[in-house]
Image (tube, grey):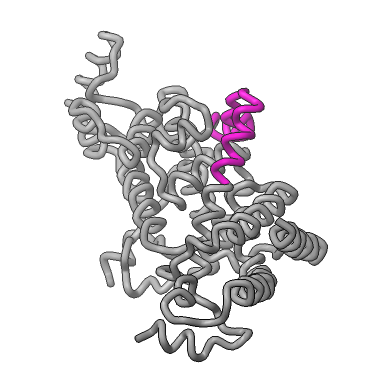
């Protein structure tokens, strides 16, 4: 049903679903190929206009390198053009492109981590962690880096500003060393498993856990100081 | 500094003199464990030591809920990156060129 509608309405600007041409007897082989290329060309330009910014920001959050992000986005579009035949239209174009981009990003990180094997878990974070705990290993309350209140999860009243949360988070991530931030983003935001990240970043599991621990400690503190509004003082929670 | 109960102090003193921290780990260790609890399943002694610690340290309890909240939050929510900067016009032009060049090459083949 849907196929028929698409093939009937298929003007120059309409997306052409691959496989519909073979469903009915259409133009000759050469004509079909030419038409397909034209639409592919215009469609690629359209994709670049529509999704390039999103993909770039997506890559930028993970790679934190302008040049690398641009390259990865370009590779993604080229790969998308080549594998357009395999795109069945089951998901939206954006999701499909993001999936390709994810693979490209992982490939890029893998290449980078293979080149420089120094496992820098971050001197900045080491300094920061130094005075978070005192000599007994307990919270150093003088430094003010201990959690100051509980966070309330899934609270309908805490209608926080989503965009502001991501802005604050990205600002805090920018303070982290590149590799720690990459590990955190891969684990938490992309939801990869530990093993995958270890093989990608070429580090041991313990190393990864230490990096994640530091990143979480730092982010928890900086989200609190920036007033991310999911957290509320304990008294307010009891009153509500 | 928070004040600890006497029985806690006694066992803590025992562990200190023994030289191993099994049940009474300091906050530094417990924060590490609570972070790792998201990534792997803790062993029984580790779980127990975290439980014991949470009896007398509310800050670590807050930290544990925070770590879990963050994890659940990221699982649920999709990233919203509208605030960060966009692709530069030069880079966009370059990508467009690369894409069209790729098309030409494909048609030549």
Residue A34 lies in quadrant: bottom right
Looking at the image, residue A222 lies above or below residue B89: above
Q: In this image, A131 relative to A237: left or right?
A: right
> Which residue is more in the foreground, A53 or A234?
A53
Residue under the point 39% across and 34% down:
A195
Can residue A36 be seen here?
yes
Can residue A150 be seen here?
no
Q: Quadrant of the C terminus of chain A?
A: bottom left
**Looking at the picture, how far across and down is residue B3, in whole percent?**
30, 34
**Looking at the picture, how far across and down is residue A105, in whole percent?**
58, 47
Q: In this image, A167 relative to A196: left or right?
A: right
Residue under the point 70% across and 65% down:
B86
Residue under the point 59% across and 88% down:
A11
**Looking at the picture, how far across and down is residue A76, in whole percent?**
61, 55
Residue under the point 38% across and 58% down:
B73
> Which residue is more in the foreground, A8 or A99?
A8
A213 in magenta: no
Q: In this image, A160 relative to B43: left or right?
A: right
Q: Main secondary structure of the magenta part?
A: helix
Q: Quadrant of the N terminus of chain A?
A: bottom left
Q: In this image, B30 relative to A198: left or right?
A: left
Q: Which residues are magenta?
A: A105-130
**Residue sitting at the far right:** B90
> Which residue is more in the foreground, B73 or A219?
B73
**Looking at the picture, how far across and down is residue B104, in whole percent?**
75, 62
């Amino acid at each position: 049903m849907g196929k028929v509608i698409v093939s009937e309405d298929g003007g120059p600007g309409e997306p052409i679903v691959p496989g519909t041409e073979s469903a009915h007897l259409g133009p000759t082989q050469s004509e079909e190929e030419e038409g397909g290329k034209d639409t592919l060309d215009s469609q690629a330009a359209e994709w670049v206009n529509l999704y390039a910014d999103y993909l770039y920001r997506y890559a930028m959050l993970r790679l934190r390198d302008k040049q690398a992000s641009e390259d990865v986005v370009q590779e993604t579009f080229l790969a998308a053009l080549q594998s357009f035949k395999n795109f069945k239209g089951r998901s939206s174009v954006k999701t499909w492109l993001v999936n390709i981009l994810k693979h490209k990003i992982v490939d890029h990180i893998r290449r980078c981590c293979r080149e420089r094997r120094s496992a820098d878990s971050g001197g900045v974070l080491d300094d920061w962690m130094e005075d978070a705990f005192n000599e007994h290993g307990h919270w150093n309350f003088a430094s003010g880096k201990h959690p100051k209140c509980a966070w309330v999860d899934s609270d309908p009243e805490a209608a926080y500003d989503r965009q502001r949360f991501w802005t604050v988070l990205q600002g805090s991530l920018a303070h982290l060393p590149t590799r720690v931030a990459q590990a955190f983003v891969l684990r938490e935001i992309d939801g990869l498993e530990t093993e995958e990240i270890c093989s990608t970043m070429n580090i041991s599991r313990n190393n990864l856990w230490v990096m994640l621990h530091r990143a979480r400690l730092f982010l928890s503190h900086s989200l609190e100081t920036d007033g991310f509004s999911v957290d509320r003082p304990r008294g307010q929670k009891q009153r509500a | 500094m928070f004040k600890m109960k006497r029985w806690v102090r006694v066992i803590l003193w025992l562990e200190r003199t023994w030289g191993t921290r099994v049940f009474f780990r300091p906050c530094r260790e417990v924060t590490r464990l609570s972070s790792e609890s998201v990534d792997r399943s803790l062993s029984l002694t580790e779980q127990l030591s975290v439980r014991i610690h949470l009896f007398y340290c509310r800050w670590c309890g807050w930290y544990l809920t925070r770590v879990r909240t963050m994890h659940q939050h990221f699982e649920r929510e999709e990233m919203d990156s509208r605030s960060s900067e966009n692709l530069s016009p030069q880079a966009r032009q370059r990508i467009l060129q690369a894409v069209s060049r790729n098309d030409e090459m494909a048609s030549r083949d």
